[in-house]
Amino acid sequence: MNRFDAIIIGAGPAGLTTALVLAQAGKEVVVLERGEYPGSKNMFGGVLYSKGLHELIPHFWDKAPVERPVARWVISALDKEASFSLDYKNARYTEAPYNAFTVLRSKFDSWYARQAEAAGATLLTETIVEDFIYDQQRVVGVKTGREDGELYADVVVAADGVNSLAARKGVIKKDLSPDDVSLGVKEILAMPAESINRAFSLTGNEGAAYTFVGAATQGIPGGGFIYTNKDKLSIGIVVKLSSLSKTGRRPEDLLEDFKQHPMIWPLIKEGEIREYLAHLIPEGGQTSSKSLYKGGLLATGDAGGFTLSTGFRVEGANLAIMSGMAAAETIKRSSRSRDFSEKGLSIYPDLLRQYGVLADMEKFRHAPNFLKNPRLYQSYPELVCQISNALFSVEPGPKKGIGEMVKEARKGKQLSRFEIIKDIYAGWRGLA
Amino acid sequence: MSINDKLLRTRFVVDSGTPHISVDTALCEGCSEKPCLIACPVECYQEQSNGVVFSWENCVECGTCRIVCPRGAVNWNYPRGGFGVCFRYG
Ligand SMILES: Cc1cc2nc3c(=O)[nH]c(=O)nc-3n(C[C@H](O)[C@H](O)[C@H](O)COP(=O)(O)OP(=O)(O)OC[C@H]3O[C@@H](n4cnc5c(N)ncnc54)[C@H](O)[C@@H]3O)c2cc1C
Ligand code: SF4
Ligand code: SF4
């Protein structure tokens, strides 16, 4: 049989959520994944926020291959030899309904795919979607790379990730530019659980999420991260592609320098590299909601541009899950009226808003511009580290007042008072 | 550790016949900035005496070169289903 109620392109969190919800509603769905197994092409930082998935699979943490619940969040400004950190720990974060977990995507996506299959969805791996099949401008199926690989359905969901060649053929008119994406490079380091606990001040199965700005990316917009898994570390950097090309610094060298930084090396020195990975993040802010659907086709997850990036912290997997729910709900409603035309699917943006996806992105619509400000990644991290230095170092002569310290730290950075006020305003508008 | 040493730890299912990306290197000659040389995180693009040389074996399919190339010289595709990079951790 090659006819389904819905065809889902891509077995990431967005596609698998759509498939799971539709299968639970009794729909015949097929998920097509180009990789050898779900997750084999996917990487993220990685922290998975529990909300969303918990609504779909209550107490998923009892069954899913999650690594550690995140108990400590540390945000640091890095200078060449110093760091200034905010360290937040919450005991509630290690109890149900946990706030977030560290996750390794290959294991997690495979598990999530099995849940969709158990609900009745069909999964075809090693199957790449090459094009759509149209009937009078409406998408009615897909052509896969397999022999006789034409499949038909009432509706197709492009959940094929950031590059989304499929969604670009079908519905998204504007291609990505270097300004719309960041590149993440990451290493998996194996390290015994006790060593991780010692280095990151953790007990038992508690996890930590460390993010860094400043010297982590040598002033390039973006940041560095370390997440603790059970007996592995995820360490990486994220850099804005448009800035990277201009600086002449290679991403793999930036990552190596970050690892060797005197504040980072002591944390990871026992780690042994097990994998090197790279992946893009869509960061252009909201794509126009018009290009999220057309007759017979919906775009969801990264393919729809649904990520929220506050520079060094990326949310995307949770938005992929929420947007997958919205896509499934859209399809359920359209199948009641048997209308999968562009008009029939036009409730999708509203549902995305109801599920919090577009609402979150609209709220943070000024963030992408604010986050391009180079001062955030160079001058300010240096500034806080230098002020801290003045606060904590004892030197001959009379003690300086805080105003004087700030003034001295600002010297040579071309940071006028006006600029600082302007940046605070932009930050408030972008992130508040 | 060099990128090649690091990539020994990353699993690939090699499709020996068909490269999934091809580069029209004739267009590279007129490209002043050559951002691909810097941005590809696994150094698939190298500058040699006869110009830019592309080799696809290390490619982790990130899509960066597709986006940074200002001249449309990169004909970018995924490998065939089941082939290419295969992350064990992710
Ligand atoms: C460095 C980095 C750090 C991040 N950190 C975090 C984080 O800490 N927390 C967080 O929530 N998010 C994070 N994200 C974002 C998050 O990873 C994504 O938003 C999320 O994975 C999107 O899910 P998706 O299902 O839309 O796409 P993906 O997970 O990319 O899945 C797409 C799937 O489609 C398949 N596919 C693609 N094309 C085809 C085709 N033609 N035919 C068949 N199959 C196809 C792919 O193989 C893949 O399995 C990070 C991302 C990066 C790169
Ligand atoms: S960016 Fe494009 S045109 Fe320029 S050198 Fe690289 S592949 Fe060639
Ligand atoms: S897709 Fe990524 S890894 Fe592959 S050649 Fe292009 S930039 Fe390099």
Image (tube, rainbow, N blue to C red):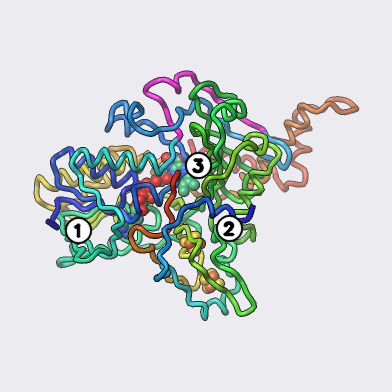
Q: Please give the name of the residue rendered at 66% of the width and 33% of the height, measured from the top-left corner.
A: A84
Q: Are marks 1 and 2 on the same chain?
A: no
Q: Measured from the top left, where is residue B18 in percent x and y?
A: 40, 70
Q: Nearer the viewer, mark 1 or mark 2?
A: 2
Q: Amino acid at mark 3?
A: Thr
Q: Measured from the top left, where is residue A47 in percent x and y?
A: 45, 36
Q: Is residue A319 toward the left or the right of residue A374 in the image?
A: left
**Image quadrant where residue A342 sits:** bottom left
Q: Amino acid at mark 2?
A: Asn
Q: Secondary structure at mark 3?
A: loop
Q: Is residue A4 toward the left or the right of residue A129 in the image?
A: left
Q: Residues within 10 Å of mark 1 (few under 14, many from 20)?
A: many
Specify the segment rendered in magenta.
A84-102
Q: Nearer the viewer, residue B74 or A34?
A: A34
Q: Nearer the viewer, residue A229 or A22?
A: A229
Residue furthest left in the image = A337
Disc 2 residue: CB within 8 Å of ligand 3: no
The answer to whether residue B24 is above or below residue A12 is: below
Disc 3 residue: CB within 8 Å of ligand 1: no
Which residue is labeled 1 in the image?
A: A295
Q: Are marks 1 and 3 on the same chain?
A: yes
CA distance separating discs 1 and 3: 34 Å
Which residue is labeled 3 in the image?
A: A310
Q: Amino acid at mark 1?
A: Gly
Disc 1 residue: CB within 8 Å of ligand 1: no
Q: Measured from the top left, where is residue A63 in percent x and y?
A: 33, 29
Mark on residue B4? 2
